[in-house]
Amino acid sequence: MPSGGHTAGRTAERENRSAFGALLDRTALEAAGTGESGDHGTLATLARKVLAGPDGSAVLDELAAVLTRPGQPLWARELAAFALGCRGDRRAFETLVLLLNHRDPARCATAAHALARLRDPRTARAAAALATNPLRTAYALHPVRLLTALRAPESVPALITTLERLVGTSRRGGLTGYRQIALACVEGLAVLGDRRAIPVLNAAREHPRLAPAASAALGRLTRTGPAGQPVSRPGRTGRTGRSGTSPSRGQGSAPPP
């Protein structure tokens, strides 16, 4: 495996360990509060086995059963869904989407982390539906961030729609409480690099609390093409299409790298 692959793999492992550690600490407190610490320890052991690497299907099946078994506490479902999602087991999808829309931001963050690693084609559509639902705007932060991470076809239209609604509301004094969500949309659109976002970013720049991020995003987008590809600068591009260069008469054009 190339060194870049090793680095990416180590980064993903560190992120999983960090998110799993925070999840364990939080769910342990919840379980202790209801006298279920023993059950939490058992489930945590199973989740560790799944996250540690390849394991038998019996362990995966045992965690999946937690998601459908009646009477399971929410912390147990969350723990099982997180481990399954990070392993790419799509049986976790429905539970993770429900948690992505939870009123508790910590549960939303855990679900978004696992969904980003699940690689289920339904994820982007679900996140877009949650982000653009005007009745659930208060819970849109993590769906917006997930859409940015996924870089799916649904990502840019959903972020534009959400930001348009928030900017329109702000003109009537309604951005209070949603600034973080609007900012996540602005930053996400900058990362995604799609020029369709320019009109809504121009509108966002008129809002004092969004102006710095929107201006930075516009600066980034005006240097990119529709799919995030650099565009040539007029007057600075030679016949090869490379900025600041022009070929000599005896020089052939090199093939693209």
Image (tube, rainbow, N blue to C red):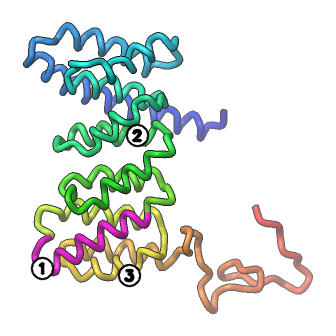
| 140 shown above or below 28 | below
Question: Could you say which quadrant of the image residue 81 lies in?
Answer: top left
| 61 shown above or below 203 | above
Question: Does the magenta run of residues contain 165?
Answer: yes
Instruction: Tell me where the magenta segment starts and ends, as one range.
Output: 156-174
Amino acid type of disc 2? Leu
| 3 shown above or below 72 | below
Q: Circle 3 is placed at which residue position? A: 199
**Circle on res. 59:** none
Return the residue found at the far front. Answer: 70
CB under 8 Å between discs 3 and 2: no
Crowding at dot 2, Cα within 10 Å, few <14 / some 14-19 / many 20+, comes out as many
- Dot 2: what SS? helix
The span from disc 1 to disc 3 (Cα, nearest Å) is 19 Å
Amino acid type of disc 3? Pro
Task: Tell me what residue is drawn at x 25 percent, y 23 percent.
Answer: 24
Crowding at dot 1, Cα within 10 Å, few <14 / some 14-19 / many 20+, comes out as few
Q: Circle 2 is placed at which residue position? A: 115
